[in-house]
Amino acid sequence: MNPAPTSDDPTPDDSGRSDITAVSALGEPARRRLYDYVRGRREPVGRDEAAEALGMPRQTVAFHLDKLADAGLLAVEFARRTGRTGPGAGRPSKLYRRSDREVAVQLPERSYELAGQLLAQAVVDAERTGDSPRASLTRRATELGHAVGAAAGPSDAEIMAALEGCGYEPRLEDADITLTNCPFHALARQHTELVCGMNLGLIEGLLDGAACTGRRARLAPEERYCCVRIGRTQ
């Protein structure tokens, strides 16, 4: 028996139409700005916060956020931001966060073809050298990251641009660079240690290739984030 569809997932008969709706929802510039703002935030976003941050009228923000939610690109939840409860606490605020759902155009970006190529190369290497497939995969990912980093520079802006080009959606949180998207998300859920090692190798290689000595990548798994976090060196 197939599981019942959730609110974040289209039904089988509607998947094509839902994907088209989701993609077309981002064609409106103001709506795309709102989507990019919400997906870049660690916590769910309220209408007032988004309106103030983007300098847009609250009514316009509410309209576009709801359209993004209707298209399945944002998920909705309700909470009282004040922390008060009981009579007089007021109505809960409507909050938005990026949906976990993937659409055909892959929002957020996924790189399963790249992962497949790295895995295939690692298997060939392991057969030739006698190394473990995991060690071969990490080495291949590190080499790829080094090549990507060599075309970048060592500054935070340049490193983040290179990471974004790889599909990681980086952002600064305090002194760390965090990654709000894993390009290999579905594979990481099934083969966590293998894929997280690949991610770490790729990002370590990128930092090394960019001659970025001021930052170091480490494994720091956290819900809704890539498993790698990039901190400052001591």
Image: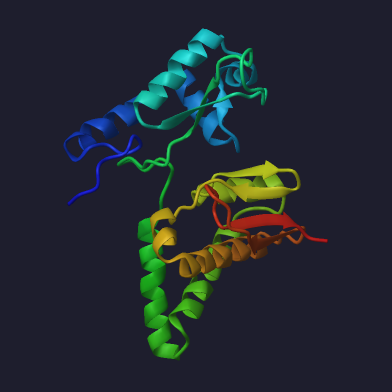
Image spot of residue 87 (x, y percent)? 61, 14
Q: Is residue 28 visible?
A: no
Question: Residue 151 lies in what quarter of the image?
Answer: bottom right
Image spot of residue 186 (x, y percent)? 39, 55
Residue at 58% from the left image edge and 21% from the top image edge:
50
- 128 or 1, nearer to the observer: 1
Query: Does 226 appear above or below 100?
Result: below
Number of marks present in the image shown: 0
Residue lying farthest bottom?
A: 130
Q: Is residue 18 left or right of residue 61?
A: left
Residue lying farthest right?
A: 234
Q: Is residue 153 visible?
A: yes
- 166 or 10, nearer to the observer: 10
Q: Is residue 115 left or right of residue 143?
A: left
Question: Residue 23 lies in what quarter of the image?
Answer: top left
The colour scheme used here is rainbow
Q: Is residue 216 left or right of residue 117?
A: right
Question: Residue 174 lies in what quarter of the image?
Answer: top right
Query: Does 59 appear above or below 201?
Result: above
Residue at 50% from the left image edge and 52% from the top image edge:
166
Q: In which quadrant of the rendered image does the C terminus lie?
A: bottom right
Image spot of residue 146 (x, y percent)? 58, 65
Image spot of residue 118 (x, y percent)? 41, 68
- 113 or 188, nearer to the observer: 188
Residue at 46% from the left image edge and 26% from the top image edge:
32
Residue at 66% from the left image edge and 65% from the top image edge:
208
